[in-house]
Image (cartoon, helix red, strand yellow):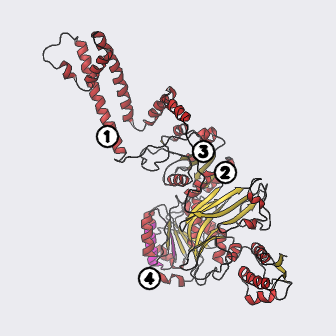
């Protein structure tokens, strides 16, 4: 993904252009259709351009969501002028052809100086150059965006998401409290928040409610069986991530050595060699030649030993080896007839020399092939296939490779499977790799004891087939299946238990739609059935966020601020709710599409309904500090707070959000001010 930091001079006026609620989608393939749906969730007007009228709609009611469907080439300036391109706030260029996408972006920028461009492209360098040239442009690769979600689904552990911000790592953790958990000793859920941790949601034991941001009551006490989801920040290091270490004893080493020398293991290796040689016929030729020469060597040794009784088996064997290495002239090099050796034995010796010459040629061919396939690079030997509790990634295209990399960061035992015989052997060198057809490969990766299987080939029907094969072998493992159509995802989710079926285009479209409103989507992850977008904001004059407390942003719009930076100051992670936003500030939040829509429209999705009553202050200093706390946490005027504390008991006339009010009561009590929530 690319996000240009500097706009060209001719784009600096962009901010002065009035924002409209019209958006244009170029390309109505699978991604384009899902982008339309994602944009309509924001309540905006969406039009589209498609080269030919679609014969099949992946989303049946999609035509009803469009204001206008234009048939034609999105690179045509006349067509774009006809569509009134200057009136569109943002254009999402998401055709399946990256060259067409780049050309369309260039044409649109000539016609419209102000429209934001969201581009589908996997060329990172080109994306950066286009961003610098055209300005107000962001680009994503939709097939790779969901890779993060696939990897997290495969983990099936407490970690729901992770991402990096300014050299620090953030993790989204799901934790079920056990009877001995120290968190059960906290007096309230509010006490779980700290400088490095922020609570996202809470599900009491036995609850079937979906996971939602801020779905927790601050005054409840955590108890065993509760489900807690929170975000925490740690230094950018994987040393704290759970790892599995094993120490091999001498007994284990001896057992492994005997296992490798056993006939069963050798037989398994021979069968595996034969199956892998399907893609490389030369290996089978070498196997045949080697077996044939071995048989000739045995026969030759016995013949020479029987014809010359005075010779030993060892000397007879040496004579055969000399013949195999082309030494026929050393034994039968005289022109005079050799009458002491029968003609048939001389002819057999000649056959040995010819067979040896053929074997040497095959060996040279194998060596040349090995050098070429390795591209003259020395790669380390891949580790053996794990015996149990491992993860299997099936399909090592761009998505599969990224999934494997993410899983490696969590120190997971992984096995990769691909059908691509031309797969670059230098990629993913630290994981076991099986290159074979998928049906055969599943029998070689200890599938019966695997923990999770991620199926991310480019063919969604093949993914379904492999998923059913995996389910038959191991009905208890967790399966993650990649699809391109939402209808298929919904059907499979209902039919297959313990299976996460993710529509890649649907997940990616939410990031594209969020970027269309000018925000920088840094990452995404799944929380329950929702996609959470890690979104970066730059506060500007006239922004709906300008002048708000972070608590008002968090609870009013249903988002979770995790970073705040004012000007050139050092960024604050898990910032205080009491920070007041101003122009030039940078903020990163965790938000659903509903939260982003609320921020865009400036309409809060929650109301301030909680009142705080203040009974008394024990000392004048407590009254003074209490007024300061009221101003800091509620954002009211200092004069109002002073007047309130001078006329106790009284009720704060400004209603607050529930979490905001509870925190105010807690802080007032710490300062010896008696207060409670009405």
Task: Please state, as top left, top right, bottom left or bottom right, where the C terminus lies in the image.
Answer: bottom right
The answer, for residue 581, to whether it is visible in the render is yes
> Magenta segment range?
101-122
**Placement of 644 over or under 518, stated as above or below:** below
What residue does disc 3 label? 467
For the residues labelled 1 and 2, the Cα–Cα distance comes to 49 Å
Q: Quadrant of residue 202?
A: bottom right
Q: Quadrant of residue 227?
A: bottom right
Q: Position of residue 135 (x, y in %)?
A: 47, 76
What residue does disc 4 label? 9
Residue at the farthest left position: 335
For the residues labelled 4 and 3, the Cα–Cα distance comes to 53 Å
- Given residues 158 and 40, the one toward you in this image is 158
**Placement of 658 over or under 170, stated as above or below:** below
For the residues labelled 1 and 3, the Cα–Cα distance comes to 39 Å
Nearest to the eye among marks 1 and 2: give it: 1
In primary-sequence order, the first of circles 3 and 2 is 3
The answer, for residue 76, to whether it is visible in the render is no
Identify which residue is drawn at 23% across, 26% down.
Answer: 326
* Contact between labelled residues 2 and 1, with CB atoms less than 8 Å apart: no
Q: Is residue 662 left or right of residue 303?
A: right
Q: Which mark is residue 368?
A: 1
């Amino acid at each position: 993904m690319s996000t240009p930091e500097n706009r060209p001079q001719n784009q600096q006026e962009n901010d002065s252009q009035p924002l409209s609620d019209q958006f244009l989608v170029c390309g109505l393939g699978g991604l384009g259709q899902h982008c339309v749906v994602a944009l309509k969730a924001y309540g905006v007007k969406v039009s589209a351009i498609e080269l030919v009228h679609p014969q099949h709609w992946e989303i049946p009611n999609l035509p009803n969501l469009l204001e206008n469907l234009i048939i034609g080439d999105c690179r045509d300036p006349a067509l774009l002028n006809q569509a009134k391109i200057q009136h569109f706030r943002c254009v999402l260029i998401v055709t399946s052809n990256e060259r067409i996408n780049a050309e369309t972006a260039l044409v649109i920028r000539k016609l419209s100086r102000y429209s934001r461009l969201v581009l589908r492209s996997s060329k990172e360098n080109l994306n950066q150059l286009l961003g610098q040239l055209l300005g107000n442009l962001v680009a994503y690769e939709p097939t790779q965006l969901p890779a993060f979600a696939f990897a997290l689904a495969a983990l099936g552990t407490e970690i729901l998401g992770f991402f990096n911000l300014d050299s620090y790592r953030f993790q989204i953790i799901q934790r079920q409290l056990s009877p001995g958990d120290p968190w059960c000793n906290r007096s309230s859920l509010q006490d779980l928040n700290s400088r490095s941790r922020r609570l996202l949601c809470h599900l009491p034991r036995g609850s079937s409610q979906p996971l939602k941001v801020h779905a927790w009551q601050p005054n409840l006490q955590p108890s065993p069986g509760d489900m807690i989801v929170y975000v925490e920040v740690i230094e950018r290091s994987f040393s704290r991530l759970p790892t599995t270490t094993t120490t091999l004893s001498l007994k284990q080493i001896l057992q492994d050595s005997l296992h490798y020398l056993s006939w069963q293991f050798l037989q398994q290796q021979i069968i595996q060699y034969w199956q892998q040689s399907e893609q490389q016929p030369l290996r089978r030729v070498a196997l045949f030649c080697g077996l044939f020469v071995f048989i000739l060597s045995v026969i030759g040794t016995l013949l020479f030993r029987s014809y010359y009784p005075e010779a030993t088996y060892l000397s007879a064997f040496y004579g055969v080896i000399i013949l195999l290495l082309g030494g026929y002239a050393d034994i039968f090099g005289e022109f005079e007839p050799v009458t002491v050796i029968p003609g048939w034995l001389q002819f057999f010796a000649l056959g040995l020399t010819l067979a040896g010459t053929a074997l040497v040629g095959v060996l040279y061919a194998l060596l040349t092939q090995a050098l070429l396939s390795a591209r003259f690079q020395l790669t380390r030997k891949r580790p053996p296939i794990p015996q149990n509790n491992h993860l299997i990634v099936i399909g090592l295209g761009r998505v599969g490779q990224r999934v494997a990399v993410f899983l490696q960061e969590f120190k997971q035992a992984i096995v990769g499977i691909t059908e691509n015989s031309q797969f670059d052997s230098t990629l993913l060198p630290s994981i076991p790799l099986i290159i074979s057809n998928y049906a055969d490969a599943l029998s070689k990766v200890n599938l019966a004891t695997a923990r999770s299987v991620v199926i991310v080939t480019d063919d969604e029907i093949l993914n379904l087939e492999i998923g059913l094969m995996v389910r038959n072998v191991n009905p208890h493992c967790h399966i993650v299946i990649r699809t391109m159509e939402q209808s298929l995802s919904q059907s499979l989710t209902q039919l297959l238990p313990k299976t996460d079926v993710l529509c890649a285009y649907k997940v990616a479209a939410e990031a594209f739609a969020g970027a269309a409103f000018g925000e920088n989507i840094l990452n995404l992850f799944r929380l329950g059935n929702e996609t959470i977008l890690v979104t970066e904001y730059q506060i500007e004059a006239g922004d709906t966020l300008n002048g708000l407390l972070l608590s008002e942003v968090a609870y009013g719009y249903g988002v979770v601020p995790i970073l705040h930076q004012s000007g050139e100051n050092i960024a604050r992670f898990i910032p205080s709710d009491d920070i007041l936003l101003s122009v030039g500030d940078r903020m990163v939040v965790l938000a659903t599409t509903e939260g982003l829509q609320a921020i865009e429209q400036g309409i809060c999705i929650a109301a301030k309904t909680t009142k705080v009553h203040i009974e008394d202050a024990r000392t004048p200093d407590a009254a003074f500090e209490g007024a300061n706390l009221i101003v800091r946490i509620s954002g009211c005027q200092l004069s109002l707070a002073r007047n309130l504390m001078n006329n106790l008991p009284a009720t704060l006339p400004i209603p607050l959000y529930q979490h905001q009010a509870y925190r105010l009561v807690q802080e007032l009590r710490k300062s010896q001010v008696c207060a409670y929530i009405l």
